[in-house]
């Protein structure tokens, strides 16, 4: 979120605008010591008849073989108190994805990211509606260097997973949360469980204190909230700017099919700029619950700056739609023009402000 926001390309923003499912590559835990690594391997194998597959294609069966493999890994485990010897990773595909294609994409991703330098084991699970793969990766590579897993690295992994999925005919997006108008991730499960029991977790107490003036000041916008809103505004303007640019290029195309396709892309970008949710911090979300107020009159961040681009896009697509003569393309062109003009009724989900 530094600088001017996301440096996503036009193709990347177009995928976001189409609301494609997100590539899910998630680190679920870091493990130190032989015992913990064995436990993590056994957990991964539990729903797979105690079977794991290694990076070399070897099949490990049963707890005895899992222990032996972990012992092989442990020869250079760290002695640091807070060291990391292995990482548990989950790769998940959207519900309804072809199982064979999903497994091929996940396998290719693991081999591409870790195969040359890091040992790993994995087990594929289809016990839920989302096909997913559990992997345990040795943090120290064959070259003796420790695996890095900072935010930028994880984002590159998600992008690579989207590429591998595309090779199997699975279309995924891998954009940052803020590029989709989203703020912080969902509450951690222990906090969520406390709320479900009707109790008040400490984070909510702190937010209440801030809202009532006992903390950061009643109603005061925090620095994080200010930066979050500013980033949201920049992203909205960027989507609108890209929409206008695509519309301008569409007008130069002589091929009717390609022109309408470009019109649809411009319309999707414009529509996303309008319907992109506004993130709310935990403090703001709690404040909304404590003091419900209509927010229908509030303009999203960046909306005023985005509007000229959106109007330009709408006018351009409106003119082009009138020139379409091919009966097979007329309705698509008109629909794109209507969407760019904001005539398409937004769904409740699109109107909902992200919490």
Image: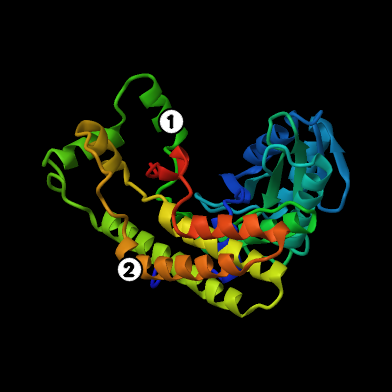
Rendered residue at 38%/72% (across/down)? 3
Q: Where is residue 78 in the image (x, y as percent from the top left)?
A: 60, 54
258 sits left or right of 187 in the view: right
The residue tagged with tag 1: helix, strand or loop? helix
Of residues 315 and 267, the one drawn nearer to the viewer in this rendering: 315
- Quadrant showing the N terminus: bottom left
Examine the rendering and report whether any part of residue 154 can be seen. no
User: How many numbered discs, if any?
Assistant: 2
Closer mark to the observer between disc 1 and disc 2: 2
- Which residue: 73% across, 51% down? 170
Tell me the crowding category of disc 2: few under 14, some 14 to 19, or many 20 or more residues within 10 angstroms, Cα based: some
The residue shown at (25%, 50%) is 298
Mark 1, Cα crowd under 10 Å, few <14 / some 14-19 / many 20+, is few
Residue located beneath label 1 in the image:
190
Which quadrant of the figure has residue 334? bottom right
Closer to the camera in the image, 37 or 330: 330
Quadrant containing the C terminus in the rendered view: top left
Q: Which circle marks residue 305 in the picture?
A: 2
Q: Position of residue 147 (x, y in %)?
A: 62, 61
Taking the view exactly as shown, the residue that stands out farthest to the top is 197
Q: Distance between the residues labelled 1 and 2?
A: 40 Å
**Residue 12 horizontal/vertical position (percent):** 59, 65
Residue projecting furthest to the bottom: 252
Judged from the image, the secondary structure of the residue bearing numbered disc 2 is helix
Q: Which numbered disc, 1 or 2, marks the residue that appears first in the sequence?
A: 1
């Amino acid at each position: 979120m530094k600088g001017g926001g996301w440096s996503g390309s036009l193709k990347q923003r177009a995928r976001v605008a189409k609301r494609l499912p997100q590539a899910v590559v998630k680190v679920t835990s870091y493990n130190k010591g032989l015992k913990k690594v064995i436990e993590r391997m056994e957990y991964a194998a539990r729903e797979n008849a105690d079977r794991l597959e290694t990076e070399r294609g070897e099949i490990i069966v049963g707890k005895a073989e899992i222990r032996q493999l972990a012992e092989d890994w442990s020869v250079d485990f760290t002695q640091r108190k807070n060291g990391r010897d292995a990482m548990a990773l989950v790769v998940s595909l959207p519900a309804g994805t072809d199982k064979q294609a999903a497994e091929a994409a996940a396998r290719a991703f693991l081999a591409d990211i870790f195969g040359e330098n890091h040992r790993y084991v994995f087990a594929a699970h289809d016990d839920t509606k989302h096909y997913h793969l559990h992997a345990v990766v040795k943090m120290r590579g064959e070259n003796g260097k420790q695996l890095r897993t900072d935010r930028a690295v994880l984002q590159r992994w998600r992008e690579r997973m989207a590429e591998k999925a595309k090779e199997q005919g699975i279309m995924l997006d891998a954009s940052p949360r803020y590029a989709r108008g989203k703020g912080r991730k969902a509450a951690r499960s222990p906090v969520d469980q406390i709320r479900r029991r009707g109790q008040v977790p400490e984070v909510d107490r702190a937010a209440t204190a801030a809202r009532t003036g006992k903390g950061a000041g009643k109603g005061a916008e925090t620095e994080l909230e200010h930066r979050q809103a500013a980033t949201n505004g920049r992203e909205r303007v960027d989507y609108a700017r890209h929409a206008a640019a695509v519309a301008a290029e569409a007008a130069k195309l002589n091929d009717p099919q390609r022109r309408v396709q470009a019109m649809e892309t411009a319309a999707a970008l414009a529509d996303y700029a309008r319907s992109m949710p506004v993130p709310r911090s935990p403090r703001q979300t709690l404040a909304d619950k404590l003091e419900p107020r209509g927010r229908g009159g509030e303009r999203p961040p960046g909306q005023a700056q985005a509007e000229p681009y959106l109007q330009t896009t709408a006018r351009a697509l409106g003119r082009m739609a009138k020139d379409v003569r091919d009966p097979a393309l007329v309705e698509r062109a008109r629909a794109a023009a209507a969407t760019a003009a904001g005539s398409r009724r937004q769904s409740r989900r699109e109107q909902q402000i992200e919490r």
